[in-house]
Image (cartoon, rainbow, N blue to C red):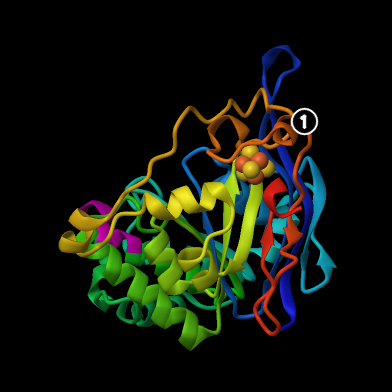
Amino acid sequence: MTDLISIEHLVKHFRLARGQYVHAVDDVSLNIGEKEIVGLVGESGSGKSTLGKTLLGLHDKTSGSVRLRGELLPEKYTAADFQRYAPVMQMIFQDPYSSLNPRMTVGEIVGEGLKLHSAKSNRDIRDEVAQWLTRVGLEADHMSRYPHEFSGGQRQRIGIARALILQPEFVVCDEPISALDVSVQAQVVNLLDELKDSLGLTLLFIAHDLSMVRYVSDRMAVMYLGSLVEVGSADQVFFDPQHPYTRILVGSNPEPDPRQERQRQSTTIQGEIPSPVNIPDGCRFANRCPQVMDICHHNTPELLPLKDITAGAEPRKVACHLYA
Ligand code: SF4
């Protein structure tokens, strides 16, 4: 599979007062193949959204690189760079309430990208907006209404139509279901699943809910305190997690079936996640890890392929001294 996105040693730090830095993304390397869906999971504050936004140029990079089909993307985007790359790379935002301008009609919101990035006439834009509203499960005459007239699930469909109308190749879905009722989460996931197949999309799907991520993703990447700790096929990571953090994350994922949920032996992570301003030496998970060893406090584990990979199995990488 050819890589569409290649991320190498990407770092994003935010400067605070008195010379301190928030280490939001630290030395992340990850490739995303054409038409591949990579799920990115981890607790709140692990840097998932910052990584997604940095990939699209919404944050300047501190260091490292991102390539789109081999082409090096700018370290800091100018208006001309956004004009160039917006039709190719788009984002579906987490909050369908705040991400839609309440003063614009649905037609203006969904058609805005075509207005900015194409030479299409107003009439053609209206026709395309109508087609896209229907495609995401809304109605063409919804284009004259305003966002407040819609439910959360419908607003997220509007956000999806807005992101996809330019027919981008790569889309970052930043927790697209976490602000929605459980009852509509599956509908939005099914819609994204159908659209990625019919449009041949490449997605980075950021979410908390591991079972949802496993459902839509080919591979899964687990992020903790700005770094990747495990990467593998979605089934490997979900059913056979290797990193102690991934194991706890999978164990704390609620079962959708209430009967199975009652029988499940849930696990919770002990201790507090360290501050991203004061990153500890060694393994970042050491203060919460049930298998911590002395070396873990001094040496930072690298994300390396597991040595005992079964022949023919998907390559899997883990950052943990247990596998050194
Ligand atoms: Fe736990 Fe050590 Fe592995 Fe970190 S490196 S996850 S502390 S065993």
Classify the position of the N terminus by image quarter. bottom right
In which quarter of the view is residue 224 placed? top right
Element under label 1?
Answer: loop
In which quarter of the view is residue 201 placed? bottom right
Q: Residue 277 placed where, x, y %?
A: 65, 24
Residue span colored magenta:
147-156
Number of residue marks: 1
- Residue 291 appears anywhere in the view: yes
Q: Residue 283 placed where, x, y %?
A: 69, 37
Residue shown at the point (34%, 79%) measured from the top left: 130
Is residue 151 part of the magenta span, yes or no? yes
Residue shown at the point (63%, 49%) measured from the top left: 51
Is residue 310 part of the magenta span, yes or no? no
Closer-to-camera residue (155/249): 249
- Residue 143 appears anywhere in the view: no
Closer-to-camera residue (265/118): 265
Query: Above or below — where is 180 with respect to 167?
Result: above
Closer-to-camera residue (214/145): 214
- Residue that sits furthest to the left in the current view: 259
The answer to whether 217 appears left or right of 190 in the picture is right
In which quarter of the view is residue 127 placed? bottom left
The answer to whether 309 appears left or right of 71 in the picture is left
Locate ligand 1 by image quadrant.
top right
Where does label 1 land, which residue? 298
Q: Residues within 10 Å of mark 1 (few under 14, many from 20)?
A: few
Query: Above or below — where is 283 with respect to 196?
Result: above
Residue shown at the point (67%, 36%) measured from the top left: 293
Q: Residue 199 placed where, x, y %?
A: 51, 84
